[in-house]
Image: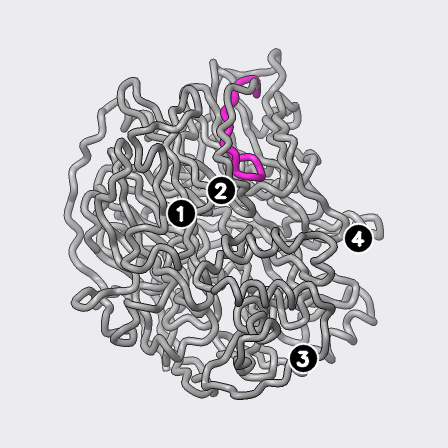
């Protein structure tokens, strides 16, 4: 069955026309797009620069202007921000630092005394008169720092920081929430989401606004509705007391003039089995428009109903003006993990291209009731492949192809096919997209959207939850969903635990389980006895699978598995990663190219395969798209934005898994990128280096 909706009327409330109170000089600075004072380049999240000193004619002359080496290893996904000639960013261990944006000269470093691990993608900045502040997040805390000195401001929160475990309507000692992507700043409000556990127990995904001066909580929006709130009937009656997730971990966009914040939300916990959360689970997997002043819902659109595939919205939406049927429309654009572009009128949520509600198979797992239909945009066409078929399996070698065919024929396969017990189901594109957290770039002059994507298959399955409190059973309940039953993980995103005792001490493993690390949330709700049992199990060589006894009706996810051939390459045919240019006015593609290569395959004459890529593009008025992102070749590229033609590239010290930033200091245009990604397997390493590029002094054209 297919239903085509031109207007998502049942989900909408009329949006008030909120008047801007921004100072004129600030509004003018925003519209000029010459700076990069916020994550995504500015509140609109379009990653665009109106600077054109660097352009298609001279980009080949780019040279390194400066580098800043944090001296740490461990990986970076940070997009720097620049304010008043100072660049602010993170080290891999989540220290915040400031350098002169023109030279890289170190100004200060803030060490919170907490060793952070994993993603930390940017800081927030706020100023009022002579008061300028930077807001970094480390572990469960959001700090308020003096932008000039890097010292915590004692009057902000509790002696300079906010504990994000508080004010969640649950016991703070059992919560696990932290920021991996910054929120947005509206007037004197810091509006944030957070990263929470993807399995139960999990914290709820409240959207919260804090006072930028004092740190006081100003408003809260419940993404898991409380009684009487919109969407309450789409959950179990008590879900608001114990279910988790529906959180905004990817960042947000802000219409400053209207005072509307646009919030993409993630899936409900547990990600892959939802028997204890019956219904569509609003406002999970939704694009949500809130009054930035009060937190009141204006409209929402749910992109995936009752998600059991981990199809959370992976990046901030983009705000842009489009032309359609002779009208200029203020639009909000959201890309997704499953490779679609949703485009709405930002004032009321009306889809600007038709959306069909298509019927998909029901779940056969006991207790699970999946949604009958899912919304699919009819335009633009998806930017990643949607169906794994035998004719697009790898042909890299005859042996790899034969292996892939044999493996493929054992899988369950199809779009929005629910997982089964004991048999792998294909997820294509995979859990990491399609689109990912790096975000899209949009040229406001043309309405062209630039989005990079992963285009490889993953698989997953369910298994009965093992009963008991022994270490092996607890590992299967709490750890195997990511690290797999065999502890192999899915590097680089999810590390292997095989032989972990040679790399981590018992004390370190205990701390990681309790507090989290990288993509992994903490498990503060586990008793010390349970944590000790899990640690002991991880330090014990892998044995035969634990017999399942006393099985309940609950099921667990068996782990994230990339569909790779025996040599470790994707078992689907290329492209394995792409960059697309889509005209949002017409929904037509201008171009799509493979993004990334494997150096060892290039040496064998196998080129243009594309590769996994994390970190997004930026676009400039100089006619260029800049992007790093690619995991294995460590390249930073400049492309002609009209054609996708490669105009310039350089090799970074490490993979550029952060989105670049572009800014001007004293008439000189810079493009900077965090080169610290990696741990991507195949011999890659990680680090913590920032590299800024500019034209040589004698070759600069007027900006």
In the picture of the structure, the residue carrying the numbered disc 4 is 601
Q: Earlier in the sequence, mark 1 or mark 2?
A: 2
Question: Regarding mark 4 in the picture, which secondary structure is present there?
Answer: helix
From mark 4 to mark 1, how far is it between C-alphas?
A: 36 Å
From mark 3 to mark 2, how far is it between C-alphas?
A: 38 Å
Closer to the camera in the image, 612 or 250: 250
Query: x and y percent of residue 368 in the render?
Result: 41, 82
In the picture of the structure, the residue carrying the numbered disc 3 is 545
Asked if disc 4 and disc 3 are in contact, CB closer than 8 Å, the reply is: no
Visible residue check, residue 350: no
From mark 4 to mark 3, how far is it between C-alphas?
A: 37 Å
Closer to the camera in the image, 549 or 657: 549
Q: Residue at x 51, y 56 (%)?
A: 514
Horizontally, is 579 left or right of 168 in the view?
right
Horizontally, is 302 left or right of 650 in the view?
left
Question: Regarding mark 2 in the picture, which secondary structure is present there?
Answer: loop
Q: Earlier in the sequence, mark 3 or mark 2?
A: 2
């Amino acid at each position: 069955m297919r239903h085509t909706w031109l207007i998502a009327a049942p989900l909408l409330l009329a949006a008030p026309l909120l008047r801007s109170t921004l100072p004129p000089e600030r509004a003018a600075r925003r519209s000029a797009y010459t700076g990069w004072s916020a994550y995504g380049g500015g509140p609109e999240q379009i990653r665009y620069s109106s600077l054109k000193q660097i352009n298609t004619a001279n980009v080949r002359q780019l040279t390194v202007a400066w580098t800043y080496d944090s001296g740490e290893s461990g990986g970076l996904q940070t997009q720097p921000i620049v304010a008043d000639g100072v660049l602010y960013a993170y080290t891999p261990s989540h220290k915040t630092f400031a350098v002169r944006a023109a030279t890289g000269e170190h100004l200060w470093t803030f060490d919170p005394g907490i060793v952070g691990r994993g993603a930390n993608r940017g800081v927030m900045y706020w100023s009022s008169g002579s008061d300028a502040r930077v807001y970094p997040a480390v572990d469960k805390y959001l700090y308020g720092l003096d932008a000039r000195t890097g010292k915590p401001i004692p009057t902000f929160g509790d002696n300079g920081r906010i504990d994000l475990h508080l004010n969640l309507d649950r016991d703070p000692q059992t919560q696990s929430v932290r920021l991996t992507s910054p929120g947005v700043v509206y007037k004197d409000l810091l509006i944030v989401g957070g990263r929470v556990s993807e399995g139960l127990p999990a914290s709820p995904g409240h959207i919260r606004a804090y006072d930028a001066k004092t740190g006081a909580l100003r408003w809260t929006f419940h993404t898991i509705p409380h009684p009487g709130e919109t969407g309450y009937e789409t959950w179990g009656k008590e879900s608001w007391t114990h279910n988790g997730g529906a959180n905004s971990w990817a960042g947000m966009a802000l219409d400053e003039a209207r005072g509307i914040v646009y919030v993409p939300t993630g899936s409900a916990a547990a990600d892959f089995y939802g028997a204890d959360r019956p219904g569509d689970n609003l406002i999970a997997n939704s694009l949500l428009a809130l009054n930035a002043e009060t937190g009141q819902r204006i409209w929402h659109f749910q992109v995936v109903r009752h998600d059991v595939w981990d199809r959370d919205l992976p990046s901030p939406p983009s705000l842009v003006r489009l032309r359609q049927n002779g009208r200029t429309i203020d639009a909000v654009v959201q890309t997704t993990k499953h490779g679609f572009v949703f485009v709405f009128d930002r004032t009321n949520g009306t889809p600007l291209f038709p959306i069909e509600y298509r019927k998909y198979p029901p779940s056969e797992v006991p207790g699970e009731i999946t949604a009958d239909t899912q919304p699919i945009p009819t335009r633009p066409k998806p930017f990643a492949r949607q169906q794994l078929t035998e004719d697009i399996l790898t042909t890299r070698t005859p042996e790899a192809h034969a292996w892939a065919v044999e493996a493929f024929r054992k899988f369950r396969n199809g779009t929005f096919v629910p997982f089964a017990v004991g048999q792998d189901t294909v997820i294509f594109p995979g859990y990491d997209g399609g689109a990912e957290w790096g975000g899209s770039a949009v040229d406001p002059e043309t309405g062209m959207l630039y989005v990079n994507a992963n285009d490889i298959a993953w698989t997953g399955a369910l298994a009965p939850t093992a009963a008991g409190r022994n270490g092996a059973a607890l590992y299967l309940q709490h750890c195997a969903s990511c690290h797999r039953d065999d502890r192999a993980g899915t590097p680089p995103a999810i590390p292997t635990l095989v032989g972990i005792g040679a790399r981590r001490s018992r004390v370190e493993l205990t701390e990681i389980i309790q507090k989290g690390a990288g993509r992994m949330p903490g498990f503060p709700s586990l008793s010390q006895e349970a944590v000790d049992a899990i640690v002991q199990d991880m330090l014990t060589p892998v044995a035969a699978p634990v017999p399942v006894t006393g099985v309940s009706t609950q099921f667990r996810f068996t782990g994230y598995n990339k569909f790779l051939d025996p040599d470790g390459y994707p078992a689907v045919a290329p492209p394995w990663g792409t960059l697309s240019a889509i005209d949002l006015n017409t929904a037509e593609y201008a171009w799509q190219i493979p993004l990334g290569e494997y150096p060892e395959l290039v040496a064998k004459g196998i080129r243009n395969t594309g590769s996994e890529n994390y970190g997004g593009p930026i676009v400039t008025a100089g006619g260029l798209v800049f992007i790093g992102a690619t995991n294995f070749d460590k390249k930073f590229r400049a492309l002609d934005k009209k054609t996708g033609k490669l105009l310039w590239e350089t090799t970074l010290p490490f993979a550029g898994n952060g989105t670049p930033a572009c800014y001007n200091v004293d008439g000189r245009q810079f493009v900077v990128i965090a080169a610290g990604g990696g741990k991507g397997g195949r011999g890659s390493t990680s680090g913590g280096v920032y590299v800024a590029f500019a034209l040589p002094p004698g070759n600069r054209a007027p900006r």
